[in-house]
Image (cartoon, rainbow, N blue to C red):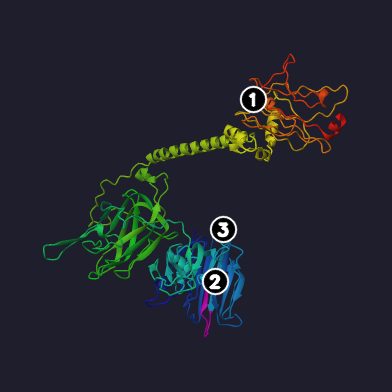
Amino acid sequence: MGRAVMVGRGPTGAGVLVLSILIILTAEGCRAQKGDGCGPSVLGPSSGTLSSLGYPRTYPNDSVCEWEIGVPRGKRIHFRFALLDVEDSDCQVNYLRLYNGIGSQRSEIVKYCGLGLKIDEPIESSANQVTVQFMSGTHRTGRGFYLSYSTTEHADLITCLDKGTDFPEAEFSKYCPAGCLTSTEEISGTIPKGYRESSPLCVAAVHAGVVSNAVGGRISVVSSKGINRYDGTLANNVTSTGGTLSNSLFTFKTNGCYGTLGLESGVVADTQLSASSVWDWNVHTGQHRLWGPSGARLKRSGRPWAPSQSDRKQWLQVDFKREKRITGIVTTGSTLREYQYYVSAYQVLHSNDFQHWYIYREANSTQDKVFQGNINFLDEVRNNFIPPIEARFVKINPISWHQRIALKLELLGCQLPSVPRPRNLPPSRYTPPPGGTELPPHLGQTTHTPDIRNTTMPPHTGQAVVLAAVLVPVLVMVLTVLILTVVCAWHCRNKKKSSEGTYDLPHWDRTDWWKSMKQLLPSKMVETEDSVRYSRSEVGRLTGRGAVPSLHAEPAEYAQPLVSGVTTLGARSTFKPDERPGPGYSDPDLYDAPISPDVYHAYAEPLPSSGSEYATPIVVDMGCHLSGGSALNQPSAVCSFLNAGASTLLTQADGGRSGRSAYDTPKNATGQVTPTEDLTYQVPQRSTQTQAGQS
């Protein structure tokens, strides 16, 4: 692992902090290069940003700078230009040149010069090492160059100057390079409301805490309608300005681990806050005003935390009782106009066991991170931890302040998933988090150990038991509901199938009450009732019963059923008139077969169109008055049916007597006629041809 050092002459004076600091980062295969024309640059292990001296102003005369960039073996590098403005026409004195490789074995990739050049396509190397060379002679104009690079696996690399208006998509993802705080472009807005569409994407991403300026990273952007007013805040060393109404804005998708951790809401109790010392201010009236750690809660009115004396040995500590994933911190000063105290810079320490403390560092950095604090006593300032801190104890150590140390804060983050914890290991085997300088817990001889009683972590073995106690009843209830649903569906299906065998009669027409009431109706009304028909499923059901012989009929309309004046109707039948079978014909005895009382015969087939009409049903009222054909006009004969015995009458058609006009009466085994009171039989009508023959 080599060290990449950008060496050059930076701007002097009290300019922007990031433009005057020499940036040193580690990267594989890189070596230090000297020059006097190097501008603010960040050389990261997989991405970075380069610029000429004086950018975005004119670069100096007669200067040179070379950057040697290396990425891991097996990878290549590509470049995107945000600005290329070099004064020259023949690229002999002023130019920018890129090489494959470093040292004497390098080979030229491309050479550029000219004012206002637009290079849209990325420039790609053929190896994992590249040299960038910038030469300037005497010139009058030209702002130099500003470019970004990354490994080729990030094909969607953008520059630090690309804005939200450059991408019309509603949602998109891009890769931001490291070092975009070298840009001087302004942003407007803040999270969670959003940023004005004219803001540079990568600078806004650093301000939002989505990516780190030292490493860069991928951003997911969502565009939406603009708002009336954009707020200006200071966050992650980036100051956003306020703005007015715009057509659109953009925000960033995050992993959601940015919630408050309980200082403002009171979830963190006062006993979980401790400090190196407390300012006890006596106003010479016998009253004592303590500026204790319980006042260090963001957005809470009252006095903040302030130590008894202001020096670098003071600290404020938060004990979360269990490890948390901490992604950011928001601080403010005293918020009291009469006491305008605030902390302008601080460091963050963290520990899992209260014995081993580590100062926070950014990824790929060898230096402890110093966070920019507040710039006044009132406004909030946010800083994000990239990568996040995973610890139980957090300490804030003020480095610089205004007048006196005074602090209110809130920590941002989320719960940690349940994983094996290294704190259970002996101290000699404890593995510290990457980076950070280990310090003793007291941070100096003048501080006292805070009271940490009752801070033992609760065991996590009970979480599985609690989870099982919740899940088992839920699963039992779900299975019970599923079983009941299946049983109900099965029952409804069987009920539906069983109902398919019922007659196609209205429910009230299948009742005994209606059958008995029909005798009170006029005969004409009874004769106009619709014929009763059987459904296909009923015919199939009757056919499937072995006890009842099957009657085969041609497709035709059936005759109407007989309607008797008795209260209950028994088994009934109709039949087709005799068709004079030929000699030797034997008529099956269909009527002597036993018939179940709950099964009706299928209707007889109708006569062909050339034959006789169906017999007219006989309707008998309670007074034994007949309405029907003239063949039955004797009241005594009709009433004999009502006064008959209790035996059931079964019909038997005699094929040899088809020409006679007689009632078809069932016979018993001895050939005797058996009367019945439940059935009234039809009299087949003689055809016109038969009557003519007899006459």
Q: Is 61 rendered above or below residue 425?
A: below
Tell me the tag on residue 166. Answer: 2
Tell me the tag on residue 289. Answer: none
User: Where does label 3 land, which residue?
Assistant: 73
Give SS at disc 3: loop
User: Where does label 1 land, which residue?
Assistant: 642
Give SS at disc 2: helix
Q: Is 665 rendered above or below residue 51?
A: above
- Badge 2: how crowded within 10 Å, few (<14), some, or many (20+)? few
* In magenta stretch: residue 425: no
Q: Are marks 2 and 3 in contact (CB under 8 Å)?
A: no
- What is the magenta segment's predominant secondary structure? loop
The residue at 46%/78% (across/down) is 54
The residue at 39%/76% (across/down) is 15
Q: Earlier in the sequence, mark 1 or mark 3?
A: 3
Q: Say if residue 162 shows up in the picture.
A: no
Q: Which residues are magenta?
A: 136-146
Q: Amino acid at mark 1?
A: Leu
Q: Earlier in the sequence, mark 1 or mark 2?
A: 2
